[in-house]
Image: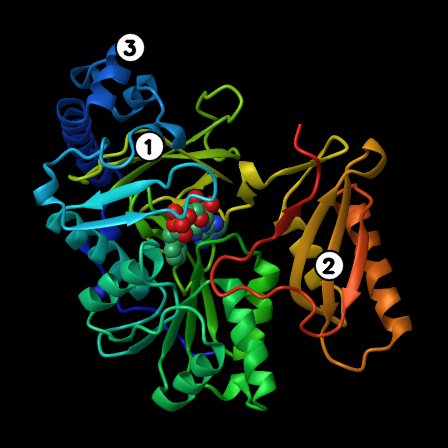
Amino acid sequence: MKDLTPAKSTLDAVETASRDEISALQLDRLKWSLRHAYDNVPFYKTSFDAAGIHPDDLRSLSDLAKFPFTVKTDLRDNYPFGMFAVPRNQVARIHASSGTTGQPTVVGYTKRDLDHWGSVVARSLRASGLKTGDMLHNAYGYGLFTGGLGIHLGADALGLSTVPISGGMTPRQVRLIEDFRPNGITVTPSYALSILDEYARQGLDPRASSLDVGIFGAEPWTNAMRHEIEQAFDMHAVDIYGLSEVMGPGVACECVETKDGLHIWEDHFYPEVINPETGALVEDGEQGELVFTSLTKEAFPIIRYRTRDLTRLLAGTARSMRRMEKITGRSDDMIILRGVNVFPTQIEEALMAIPGLAPHFQIELSKPDRMDQMRVFCEVAEAGIGAQARSDAARALAASVKQTVGISISVEVFDVGGVARSEGKAVRIVDKRPKT
Ligand code: DLL
């Protein structure tokens, strides 16, 4: 793999600023953001007043912990534009979450917000090893989802040649990678695996492709998956994080030279980690739920938003800004199986270590005989793997999960192509348990 470390001279000054400089900037911006939300969004005025707190009460960064949280239902209750802090005619862009249950979550951006978004995505793409003049194959979905258009903004800001292919039509993805010869690809890790399958189907060697780096996010993925993808494509695989409520992709990103967790672009997003049960801040470096406050957003300021994503905060390394550890999972995706907490990433980790199994999987939960049961559907890595090898692999996976996670599961190993493929975010859990 090529050394893609960006030249220090190309970084934004704030990426190498001292912690004191970053904190001072954050405090200034935080005061503005709280005041902006309070003065312009009735929801925040009501919620701050109810908690007996006012933007003027913030004198240090730690005072933020006195302010109330914002949760997804608050955004839904104010559907569609109730959380906007500027008149509608100053909103330059609207995105929305798919809203599998209930109202979709709608977010807005002013022209200046879009400029900031572009700058943090550009910073992320540069941290991933891309530079002005490179070509990017952007296979995140375009549309209301923030992935495609968010990455596109940053690619424009960095000066890349962008191929806005979006998700889907997998044979064409391979064709255009082969014909256009991009340096980088932005895509969900699960869809990257579908593209990889298509390389095999077309009899092409992915290691011979032009790709130097893949920038993967929008869903949890493990270091074991990173290794698999890096080997398969002979390229770097870095992790990019974001959520529409806070901005979209580019809230945090790994640096290609370290790949040791995602640097949070703290000049725009202020992170906290809380105990999800009590809401109290955890000790430095402890695991918990990530909470974000926007520092510069005009159209859609967001104060202490509970992301439900579980991680821990770590000191900066390749950049001064703090890192978040690779996300273990969302608290909503945590399966409690007979009292044991399980995340799909733990199944992924175990699966990737079993020879003969492909990296595709889906988890089915059911409840026969009043006992929760987990079945993992996976498939053979290549056609022609016989019945004995399949049942050995199934047994090995079940034993590994029993040993590492402490639960009994059953495993079914299908033929190649037997597990549903993703063109965006993978559906990892199919819950067939009766609703109580
Ligand atoms: O998924 C934004 C995005 C697009 C990020 C492209 C990265 C790349 P939402 O659809 O609002 O936004 O979903 C946000 O996805 O709260 C996490 O649970 C999950 N997520 C996003 N990035 C990662 C990641 C986009 N790198 C939700 N690792 C978040 C793990 C991620 N989970």
Badge 2 is on which residue? 377
N-terminal label among 2 and 3: 3
Q: Residues within 10 Å of mark 2 (few under 14, many from 20)?
A: some
Asked which secondary structure carries label 2, the reply is strand
N-terminal label among 1 and 2: 1
Eye-nearest disc, 3 or 1: 1
Across and down, in percent, residue 318 comes to: 36, 56
Gap in angstroms between the C-alphas marked 1 and 2: 35 Å
**What amino acid type should be assigned to the residue bearing mark 1?**
Leu
Look at the numbered discs 2 and 3 and tell me whether their residues touch, using CB distance below 8 Å.
no
Look at the numbered discs 3 and 1 and tell me whether their residues touch, using CB distance below 8 Å.
no
Across and down, in percent, residue 335 comes to: 66, 39
N-terminal label among 3 and 1: 3
State left or right for residue 262 relative to residue 198: left
Across and down, in percent, residue 226 comes to: 55, 64
Across and down, in percent, residue 411 comes to: 80, 56
State left or right for residue 283 relative to residue 399: left
Q: Residues within 10 Å of mark 3 (few under 14, many from 20)?
A: few
Gap in angstroms between the C-alphas marked 2 and 3: 48 Å
Does residue 354 appear in this view?
yes
Asked which secondary structure carries label 3, the reply is helix
Q: Residues within 10 Å of mark 1 (few under 14, many from 20)?
A: many
Badge 1 is on which residue? 75
State left or right for residue 299 relative to residue 227: left
Residue at position x 70%, y 68% in the image: 418
Picture colour scheme: rainbow
Badge 3 is on which residue? 50
Gap in angstroms between the C-alphas marked 3 and 1: 18 Å
**What amino acid type should be assigned to the residue bearing mark 2?**
Phe
Q: Is residue 7 or residue 82 the one in the foreground?
A: 82
Q: Quadrant of the C terminus?
A: top right
Q: Is residue 344 or residue 425 the one in the foreground?
A: 425
